[in-house]
Amino acid sequence: MQLRRLQLTIHLLTACFAILCLTIPALAAGPQTTVLYAFQGPYASNGQDGEAPQALIADEAGNLYGVTAGGGTCLLAHYETHPCGIAFELSPPSSAGNAWTETVLYEFGSNLNDGPYPLGNLIRDKAGNLYGVTGYYSEGTGTDCGVFYEISPPAPGGGSWTETNLYGFGGYADGCGPLGTLVQDSHGNIYGVTVYGGYPPAGVPPKGYGTGGIFKLTPPSTPGETWTESFSGNIYPEFYQNGGIAIDGNNGLYMTLGPSVYEVFPPATPQEVWSWNVVYTFQGGQDVASPLGLTVDSHGNIYGVTPTGGTANDGTVFELSRSGNGWTESTLYSFQGGSDGYEPIAQPTLDKAGDVYGTTYGGGGNITNCLAELEGCGTVFKLTKIGNGWTERVLHTFEGPMGLN
C-alpha cells in the first residue's frame, strides 16, 4: 500500500485533468460525456491555471467550487519551480452549449503564511466562505504539517477573494498532513483525518510523526476568534489513515483505517478522549481489504470501495448495513480488470433511486491510448440493483493523453 500511495501521489501532482459532466438520458445510445473545463496546468498562457483538480461542490446557482493540487504561481521560498495549487470556481454558461467559465479564486503559495498542495474537498457555509486543508508546509506557522484555511468572497462592490489560516497542524499532538474528505456536522464542526501525527503507544519508539488520526475543528462562538482542535492519534497503531471520513444524518462519524471501518465518537471538549467502535473488519481475499472512500445513505447504510480483493482481486464496491446489534457486509460488485475497470479508490456517490456511481483508477480496455496503464485509463461506472443482485454499467471509458475525447 505504501508504494501504491506514492504512485497515486505522483500521478496526482503531475497530470492535468478535465472536469467532466455525465448526462444520463433514457436513450438506447447510453450516456453522453461533455468536458466542462480542461485545466491547462502551470504552463498555461496566463501562468495561473491549475492541474489535478480535487472533489467538487456546488452552490444553489449551479456554480462548482474546488481546488487543484498543482498549478498556479507559487511564490513560497524553495517552491518557485513547483506550483502550489489554486482554488477555483466554474460557472455555467448563460446559454446552453456555450463554454463554462473558470475563475481562479486564490493561488496557494502566494504568501509565506499559507501552504501548498490543497487536497480533498471544500466545505461551503451559508455566507459563501470556503474551508479546506493543505497537506504540506506553512512557513508562517513554523510547521510543515499543513493548514486549515478559509477563503472568503469579496465584499459587495468588488475586490479579491481573501485567504485566512484558521489553524496550523503541528505534528504529534494535533496531527500532520490532513488528507481526504472533510465533513461538517449540524453544529458547524469540521472533521477530517491526517496521514501522520499522534504519539506512539507506551513503550513504542516514535516513528516520524506517528501513524495519523482524526481531528475535529470547532468554530469560535464569536466571529473572528480562534478555532479549536481536538485530535486522536493512533486509533490503530501501525496503519496510516487510508481514506476520508463520512457523516450520517444524525452526525454519526465513520472512517476507514487499515482493514477496518470504524464508528468514531468525538469528545465533548478538546481535553477529553475520543472513542470508537469497529463496524467491520475485512479479512482479505474475496472478503476484500483496505476499504476506502465511505458514503452513508439516508437509511444509515455505509457504501465504500476497496482497490483490491473480490473474485478477481481487482477491487470491489461494498455495503455495510445494520443487523441487530452489529453490521452485515455485502459485496455489491467485484471488478474483473478488463472493460469494467479495476482498482476503485474514490468515494462513491448515490442518487435518489439508490444507484451507486464511482470511478476506477485503471481498466476500460483502451490500451493503445493510455501511456500509464496497460489495461486502460479508467472508467466511470454505475451500479443498479436488480432483484437480489447488482449490475454494473460503464458510463465512460477514459482515453488518456493519446485519446480523442
Image (spheres, rainbow, N blue to C red):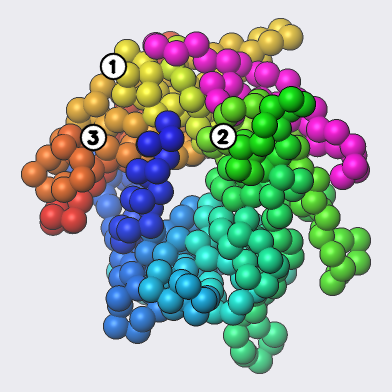
Which residue range is magenta in the image?
257-286
Q: Is residue 296 visible?
A: no
Badge 1 crowding class, 10 Å Cα cut-off, few under 14, some 14 to 19, many 20 or more, is some
Using the image, determine if residue 330 lies above or below residue 176. Answer: above
Q: Kindly indicate whether the residue at mark 1 contacts the one at mark 2 (C-beta within 8 angstroms).
A: no
Q: Nearer the viewer, residue 220 or 205?
A: 205
Q: Is residue 35 visible?
A: yes
Where on the picture, by quarter, is residue 99? bottom left
Q: Kindly indicate whether the residue at mark 1 contacts the one at mark 3 (C-beta within 8 angstroms).
A: no
Q: Secondary structure at mark 3?
A: loop
Residue that protrudes farthest toward the top in the picture: 324
Please indicate whether residue 378 sits to the left or right of residue 92 in the image: left
- Give the mark, 3 or 1, whose residue is nearer the N terminus: 1
Q: Real-space Cα distance between discs 3 and 1?
A: 13 Å
As for residue 159 lying within the magenta part, the answer is no
- The kind of residue on which mark 1 rests is Ala
- Identify the residue under disc 2: 240
Please indicate whether residue 255 sits to the left or right of residue 85 in the image: right
Badge 2 crowding class, 10 Å Cα cut-off, few under 14, some 14 to 19, many 20 or more, is many
Which residue lies at the image location 40% right of the left edge and 48% below the top edge? Answer: 9
Callout in the foreground (3, 2): 2
Callout in the foreground (2, 1): 2
- The kind of residue on which mark 2 rests is Tyr
Which residue lies at the image location 70% right of the left edge and 67% below the top edge? Answer: 141
- Identify the residue under disc 3: 363
- The kind of residue on which mark 3 rests is Gly
